Image (cartoon, rainbow, N blue to C red):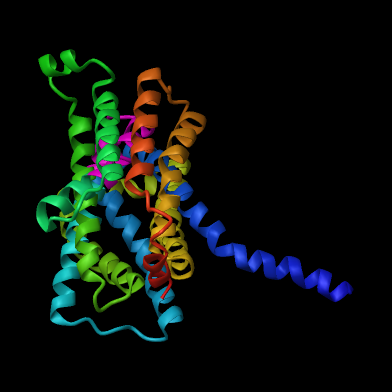
Amino acid sequence: MHDRGQTRPASSLKAKLPMIKLFLAPVIWGGALTAGRIVSAELPAFTTSCIRFIIASLIMIPALWMKEKRFPKPTKQDLVWIFLLSLVGVVMFNALLFTGLKTITAVRSSVMLAFTPAVVSIIAFVLFRERITLMVGLGIIAATIGAVLTITNGDIAGIIESGIAIGDLYMLGAVVAWAAYSIIIKSAMSNLSPLALLAYGSVMGVAILIPITFFEHSWSTVPTLSTQAIWSLLYLSIGAAGLAYLWYYEGIAVVGSSKASVFLNVEPVAAIFIGVVVLGETLTVIIAMGAILVIGGLLLTNYRPRKKMVTRNRDRG
């Protein structure tokens, strides 16, 4: 009887582990905005991105070997997809993100980035004529209103008169870049696994970034980084670009992509909470309203009727 009592908690924990990892992954991503804000004050965007993905590559390549027992050979078409993913998801997104974080808060940026799923739905509709359901449509409208409130801080007339801040434009660019990355990766996964794409994309991203970083003339400043910036950079590399992605993909393998995507709703909440607690940023009433609308819209765009059980079961395969 004693042995059974010891076995059940262990097996129960093992069964819940994928769900725990799925919850922790977006929490880590939420904290990446705070870490990025700290690093961006001391390092320029391309150098930060390059160091981040050098470290991430050192994690992803061994992880790929341990998981698949080989390095899958990409076809010529795969190489084109990997290049596009690296250019959009590694180079452009990170450069725009870290440049934007120099001038706007982690709280503000988290609300804007949470607008991404709505942008993905719009792009998919325009390019691929993917049907937008009533729920998704309502979600897009709610998220758009929330994003506008956040960007303008409730003063739409003032923004029209004076113009949008440059940091907001960079962050909007990051939203579009990540939305494009999300669209591209759907086609790119036809032959290679997500982990293989992530590993190869990280390496190719570094290859693209290294020549660009020399124009920033900032490698000599790396040894002088503050302790806080070093820890933040390690967090961005090992945590956000390494463990979080691995845990998210492991979760998808167990529960399917539809259920896994719901956990992404945790990211903006975590980002706002960490930004307020760690950096002491102010959560204004307007930004709070924008966050509620964007997160509510995110929930609606991820809504799946219960009757579609067949699709969800296919995801598990």
Q: Quadrant of the N terminus?
A: bottom right
User: What is the quadrant of residue 60 in the picture?
Assistant: bottom left
Residue 294 in the figure: left or right of residue 125: right
Magenta segment's dominant SS is helix
Q: Which residue is pictured at 11% across the width and 50% down the height? A: 126
Q: Which residue is pictured at 20% across the width and 68% down the height? A: 187
Residue 171 pos. (x, y %): 23, 38
Q: Quadrant of the C terminus?
A: bottom left
Q: Is residue 2 above or below residue 34?
A: below
Given residues 108 and 57, the one toward you in this image is 108
Q: Which residue is pictured at 42% across the width and 61% down the height? A: 242
Given residues 156 and 311, the one toward you in this image is 311
Q: Is residue 19 above or below residue 6?
A: above
Residue 312 pos. (x, y %): 40, 65
User: What is the quadrant of residue 275 in the picture?
Assistant: top left
- Specify start and end residues of the magenta stretch as a single range: 96-118
User: What is the quadrant of residue 38 in the picture?
Assistant: top left
Q: Is residue 135 visible?
A: yes
